[in-house]
Image (spheres, helix red, strand yellow):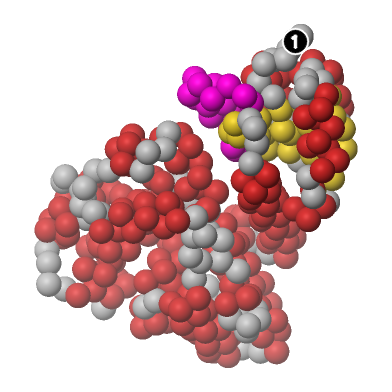
Amino acid sequence: MFKLVIVEDEDNIRHSLECFIPWNQMGFEVVATFSDGSDALAYLKDNPCDAVMTDVLMSRMSGLDMIRQLHTIHPQIKVVILSGYSEFSYAQEAIRYQVVHYLVKPVDVDELMEVFTNIAEQLQQEKQDASVEETVAETDPLLNAELSTIPEYKLLIMELDLHSRETLNRVLNRIVSDRQGFSVEELRTALAGLYSATALCYQKRKTDVAAITDGRFTADHLYSTDSPAKLTACIIEDFGILCDALKTGGYKSRHGVIERVAQDLQENIAEDVGHDVLGQKYRLHPGYLSRLFKQEMGETLSDYMLRIRIEKSARLLKEGHHKIGEIAGLVGYSTPSYFSIMFKKYTGYSPREYCQKVLL
């Protein structure tokens, strides 16, 4: 169970929230309640929880004052504001301190339950991410020193995103051939780290690779092989399974507005669509839209935009019908030079190097 603290100065509302909301169904336990922000803050300094639901205007310390100080002490705590005051200035102030939702009294129970169900899922995802990162660090001593910086890994993820089996196999062969000096055990360890890092990458984007491959994408296969050639065949088979699974079973946002935003960005990839423009179009505060997008998609709007632009440019490079300068314009970059910089930042190769060293 995740721990929840409720801060509300009206006794009847505080009691109702504590006793009549089915918190257990949403994965929460109410560990403390307070009628004032100062008392709550004193408790939270020594007893951090997972989430706080607080009123805004209270006698000694307002909810916003409490949130400001709490953000400095425990920035990881999820905060939901519950208030009878719906002025937008409160919501704007709340967004600055990473408040995850703003509920207006009288509270709608269904809406409250939806909010906390989503928070519980987010907390569980963060817990899983931390566990995977710890596992990667423990199981692959070469990963931190090598894997995060080699261009092959960046390319590997892009080719998986593009569902491009042929180029993916070239990248996997290159990963093994570039490590000819490794012993079989060292190579096996490095490749096992590749599985872990790949799983972590997609987990952050809300895709469970074990689930979509029915458990077939696993480094366990590596430990029954005893030569570089067999290890190469193994990773080509396993990453091929993942590639096909991602094509049909990748993550889809459960939040309708985020699905529309993502589709909008894909369809208007050549346009410079900023957070403010999207917020106005979808009638959401830009800060809230950004946080909701990150929560649902596992990556920021900016990172997502960069990814889909580079992926589309890679598709166009593979087709071979356009010059690099033309492709830059088609994916929203004003100059070929800036496009080349961003392409290399994302893949480890310039567009020309990608054509000459990867596609050929």
View extreme (top): residue: 60
Residue 276 appears left or right of 202: left
Residue 173 appears left or right of 137: left
Q: Residue at x 51, y 21 (%)?
A: 87
Residue 51 magenta-drawn?
A: no
Q: Residue at x 39, y 76 (%)?
A: 163
Can residue 358 be seen at all in this image of the molecule?
Answer: yes
Quadrant of residue 189 within the rendered picture: bottom right
Q: Which residue is mark 1?
A: 59
Can residue 190 be seen at all in this image of the molecule?
Answer: no
Stretch in magenta: 83-101
x and y percent of residue 303 in the render? 41, 49
Q: For this rendering, which residue is in front, 220 or 274?
A: 274
Q: For this rendering, which residue is in front, 270 or 337?
A: 270
Q: Residue at x 50, y 76 (%)?
A: 249
The mark tally for this picture is: 1
Height in image: 65 above or below 133? above
Residue type at numbered disc 1: Ser
x and y percent of residue 293 in the render? 47, 48
Quadrant of residue 21 within the rendered picture: top right
Residue 13 appears left or right of 349: right
